[in-house]
Amino acid sequence: MLIAISKEAALRKDYLQQKINTIYLGGGTPSLLAIRDLRCAIDTLKTFFTIDEEAEITLEANPDDISEEKLIGWRAAGINRLSIGIQSFFDDDLQWMNRAHNKQQALESLGSAVKYFNNITIDLIYGSPTLSDEHWKENVETALALNIPHLSCYALTVEPKTALAKMISLHKKEGTDTDKQAMHFELLMQWLKEAGYEHYEISNFAKPGFRSKHNSSYWRGDHYLGLGPSAHSFNGTSRQWNIANNALYLQGIEKGELNFEIETLTAKQQLNEYIMTGLRTTEGILFSDDRWKLTENSTTSKIMLSAKKWETSGNILTDENSLRLTDTGKLLADGIAADLFQL
């Protein structure tokens, strides 16, 4: 697979014309890779692309994969940011979510990680049936006590056709409670604001200077290249995604072929994507953004008319420069975005 991804990088070296400011190794379990393989992957990218010397290079890691030896090796390989899938610091939550690690491994992994990395983000899940309000507060307080500079916090979602969805449908596991999730989210916003974190995107909180540069580029509509099975790429006008089947991906690359699907985005689709991503950020939808400025006046008038009722209800703030969500509006972000979409 690593050889195939390297070959794909060679085949697609002209897809991006800009200097690369961020690299994200994830979407799988790259923390299982040998250090030499990670170093080889990063060196391969440097061969085909111009990488900024100060580029943010993130590695996704599972707590049970982390060791002192690996942390040292990751730093030496060029990794400068870790994304660690903690989810919870309580064993009953982790067992309910079928996570491989336990509370002790979560704590030990972070205790080691902060010795070698100052730029760390962790995932926390709220609103699960096993997570009490007290435990949710303790989860957040534990992250703060460890001085973790970035938190990505998500309401538990049950994807259809998964083992978890089946267990819930058979009443073998308790389902989620949307009211509980909303309350946990409101408490989260309050606690992290008091702790000095910027709520710069609906699910993301950072100390000043520690926003995720990589994820922020998605929300800004920057161009990006994804390598490997299922990976998505965007060049400003079209989006494409590689075949998801590993075997077929490998067969195609071996023949020097790229197996992917592609869609060219209309101006209206680009606008709707901007509405969806822009609303999620603290800056909101900026009227100076090219995706907004290229929109016909009649369309922007329709959007502002739709936004008016959300402003009246206290869910949106508008001024001469932007349109953005209030804290209460963040609870309704998907619905508000859908209401502003142009069909």
Image (tube, rainbow, N blue to C red):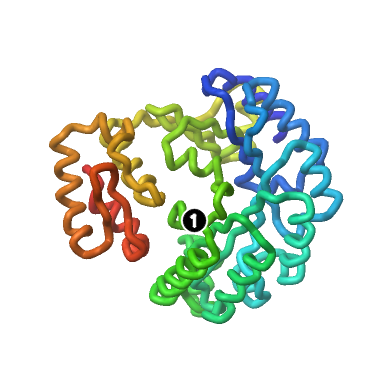
Name the element at disc 1: strand
The one of 200 and 159 positioned closer to us in this rendering: 200
Residue 87: x and y in percent read 61, 64
Residue positioned 38% across, 47% down in the render: 283
Q: Position of residue 114 (x, y in %)?
A: 74, 56
Residue 12 figure quarter:
top right
Give residue 64's quadrant in the image.
bottom right
**Badge 1 local density, few (<14 within 10 Å), some, or many (20+)?**
some
Name the residue: 19% across, 40% down: 300
Q: Position of residue 281 (x, y in %)?
A: 41, 49
Could you tell me if residue 171 is visible in this image?
yes
The residue lying furthest to the right in this view is 69
Viewer-nearest residue: 296 or 30: 296
Please, what is the three-letter code of the amino acid marked with disc 1? Glu
Q: Residue at x 30, y 42 (%)?
A: 272
Instruction: Give the percent coordinates (x, y) of residue 291.
Output: 31, 33
Height in image: 320 above or below 52?
Answer: below
Instruction: Indicate left or right for 174 with 109 as reference.
Output: left
Q: How many marks?
A: 1
The quarter in which the C terminus is drawn is top left
In the image, is 79 to the left or to the right of 122?
right
Q: Which residue is mark 1?
A: 198
Q: Note whether residue 255 is visible.
A: no
Depicted 216 relative to depicted 106: above or below? above
Left or right: where 336 falls relative to 70: left
Q: Residue at x 32, y 44 (%)?
A: 285
**Image quadrant in which the N terminus is located:** top right
Of the pair 237 and 284, the residue shown nearer to us: 284
